[in-house]
Amino acid sequence: MRIEDTDPARHAGIEYPMEVGAPVFAPIKVLEEKDKAVNVARQNAKLEYDRIMEQAEVLMKQARSLQARLDATEMVHSAKFSFNPLHGKTYHLYFDSRIGTNVLIQNGPDQWSCGIPDAWTYSMAVKKLGDSTWAVVEEDEPASSSLAVR
């Protein structure tokens, strides 16, 4: 069987050199190359998956924070108060068991001269944010309503 030099498509499919000056080459082991390609693809996909999961964790943390702000906002707006709260100022939420509702005031649990009223239970410290939502203030943060003693 003779292969004509004018048929380059057949030359590409033969496993041995067709010309005297052609470089020596060995057939490619297709299964090994496929395995290598699959392993590289899996490693790259895992890196991408891990990066996406980190972003998802950040988004879930932001969603939980937003939900906590909305919950605090609903609690404050359902509470009784008789003043106009200022943005950025810390207020305190108490539950009044006599009337069965929350009360928003400026005094914290340690800022009473004669103690918290008997029917009141301290709930949380909240701060009004610039977008008119309320955020729960952590207990270790300094309250902006407390006065410094000199």
Image (spheres, rainbow, N blue to C red):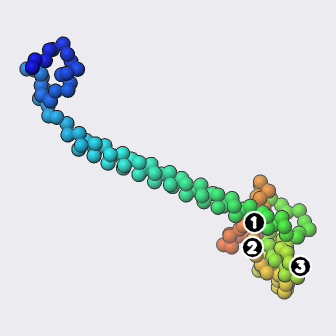
Q: Is residue 135 above or below residue 149?
A: above
Pick whichever of labels 1 and 2 is earlier in the sequence.
1
Instruction: Kindly identify the residue that appears in the image at 71 percent across and 68 percent down.
Output: 137
Q: Quadrant of residue 117?
A: bottom right
Please identify, in this view, whether the residue under mark 3 or under mark 1 is nearer the observer.
3
Most foreground residue, 62 or 139: 62
Q: Are marks 1 and 2 in contact (CB under 8 Å)?
A: yes
Residue 88 drawn at (x, y percent): 77, 60
Residue 75 drawn at (x, y percent): 79, 67
Quadrant of the image containing the N terminus: top left
Residue lying at the far front of the rendered structure: 1
Instruction: Kindly identify the residue that appears in the image at 16 percent across and 27 percent down.
Output: 14
Q: Can residue 57 be spotted in the picture?
A: yes
Looking at numbered disc 3 in the image, what kind of residue is underneath it? Ile
Residue 3 drawn at (x, y percent): 13, 18
Name the mark on residue 99.
3
Q: Can residue 144 be spotted in the picture?
A: no
SS at circle 2:
strand
Label 2: which residue?
A: 124
Q: CA distance from mark 1 to mark 2?
A: 9 Å
Is 12 left or right of 52, judged from the image as shown?
left
Name the mark on residue 72.
1
Label 3: few (<14), some or many (≥20) within 10 Å?
few
SS at circle 1:
helix
Q: Is residue 116 above or below residue 8?
A: below
Most foreground residue, 21 or 128: 21
Is 93 left or right of 12, judged from the image as shown?
right
Residue lying at the far right of the rendered structure: 82
